[in-house]
Amino acid sequence: MFRLAVLIALVAAPGFAESVIATRTIRPQEIIMPEDVRLDQAEIPGAYRDVYEVVGQEARFALYPGRAVMRGAIGEPALVDRNQMVELVYEYGGLRIVAEGRSLGRGGVGERIRVMNTGSRTVLFGKISEDGTIIVSK
């Protein structure tokens, strides 16, 4: 009974924190599932503290079992892959230009990547929209 009281006191103690730990090797570009991570009773600076922030995200590089999942190690799942054919959209005022392009990078919604207009071979930057089109900025 005494041990249980000590454990409860530790959990309720101010400053007590948990960190998200990988339970298996998670390869880059792999989506993290609930069984891939657990909470550990340790405060690791820079590590995620909530499993729900991690599950469903994509590993940016390899995550190893027993190690904390650090901020920057994961991100939104990629919607556009490198060398994928994409639709480029440029809008300004009432003008709308749509062209075919090729992605020169990989990224998720809202990320900025390099793309090449396949017609002119011009390299541009654009932001990935929710439907996978690339909004090209001026």
Image (cartoon, grey):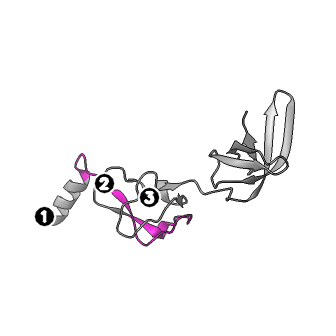
Tell me what residue is drawn at x 35 percent, y 64 percent.
67
User: 106 or 114, which is in the foreground?
Assistant: 114
Return the disc, 2 or 1, that comes first in the chain's sequence: 1
Q: Amino acid at mark 1?
A: Phe
Secondary structure that dominates the magenta span: loop
Q: Which residue is mark 1?
A: 2
Which residue in the rendered view is the most extreme toward the left?
Answer: 2
Dot 3 falls on a residue whose secondary structure is: helix
- Left or right, 101 with respect to 21, comes to right
Q: Where residue 136 sits: x, y (%)?
A: 74, 40
Callout 1: 10 Å neighbours few (<14), some, many (20+)? few
Pick the quarter of the image with the C terminus. top right
Up the image or down, 125 lies above or below 68; here it is: above
Task: Name the mark nearer the viewer: 2 or 3.
Answer: 2
Task: Name the mark nearer the viewer: 2 or 1.
Answer: 2
Q: Where residue 23 sits: x, y (%)?
A: 40, 70
Q: Where residue 115 sits: x, y (%)?
A: 72, 49
From mark 2 to mark 1, how far is it between C-alphas? Answer: 28 Å
Return the disc, 3 or 1, that comes first in the chain's sequence: 1
Q: Where residue 29 sits: x, y (%)?
A: 56, 64
Dot 2 falls on a residue whose secondary structure is: loop
From mark 2 to mark 3, how far is it between C-alphas? Answer: 14 Å
Q: Which residue is mark 3?
A: 51
Q: Name the mark on residue 44.
A: 2
Tell me what residue is drawn at x 60 percent, y 57 percent.
77
Instruction: Please provide the residue range marked out in magenta.
Output: 12-38
Q: Name the mark on residue 18.
A: none
